[in-house]
Amino acid sequence: KTIVFIHGASMSSATWLPQLNDEVLGKKYQLYAVDLPGHGESEWSKDPEGYELKALAETISHFINALHPKKFVLVGLSYGTNVIGEITRSLTNCKGILMESPCILNNTFSPDRILIPVPLGHVMSAENPPDNELKEFINHVTDDAGFGERFYNSYRKTDPAFRRALGNTLLSS
């Protein structure tokens, strides 16, 4: 049994460290968390189209297929739920999906109908916001210091071109 964790925008596989380090889960399941292109330890894309949702989904789909899992569950956080939405049709051995804080972007609903405005929310699509804005945003969305630190570090390692592509996706929705 396998669980594949997919992080959100400007996050990394470090988002899932509590789950990956959980002894009970580790004994029962094979656990994988992958860095989306332009995030964490992955390479930055030379082509901005590499950050489009379909390209991210294709990358994750190839990763899962290379594992050859007999059965697996997908767990996504925020923007990672969009990636899951793009790949589930092609993954026949997927036995379950868990979406945490889903943020489903599509052409049916405008962003103002599916996104909850938060103070300084623009940092999610800003290429390089000032540190004080990023830290204030993080303090607004979580009171978990460990998560906040992991998010800050992941955000600063994420390719700013990814956030530009995310902003373009929001504007075109």
Image (tube, rainbow, N blue to C red):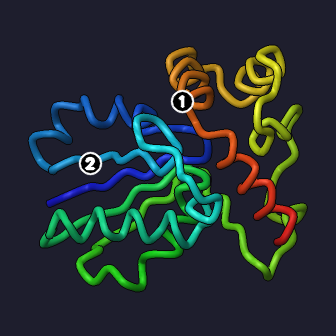
As drawn, the label of residue 154 is 1
**In the image, residue 161 lies at what x, y percent?**
68, 46
Helix, strand or loop at label 1? It is helix
Q: Is residue 173 left or right of residue 52?
A: right
Pointer 1: residues within 10 angstroms few (<14), some, or many (20+)?
many
Q: Quadrant of residue 108?
A: bottom right
**In the image, residue 76 lies at what x, y percent?**
47, 55
Amino acid marked by disc 1: Ser
Image quarter of the C terminus: bottom right
34 is higher (above) or lower (below) than 1? above
Q: Is residue 29 left or right of residue 58?
A: left
As drawn, the label of residue 32 is 2
Q: Which residue is more in the foreground, 43 or 21?
A: 43
121 is higher (above) or lower (below) than 172? above
Q: Quadrant of residue 149?
A: top right
Please identify, in this view, whether the residue under mark 2 or under mark 1 is nearer the observer. 1
User: In the rendered picture of this protein, how many numbered marks are placed on residues?
Assistant: 2
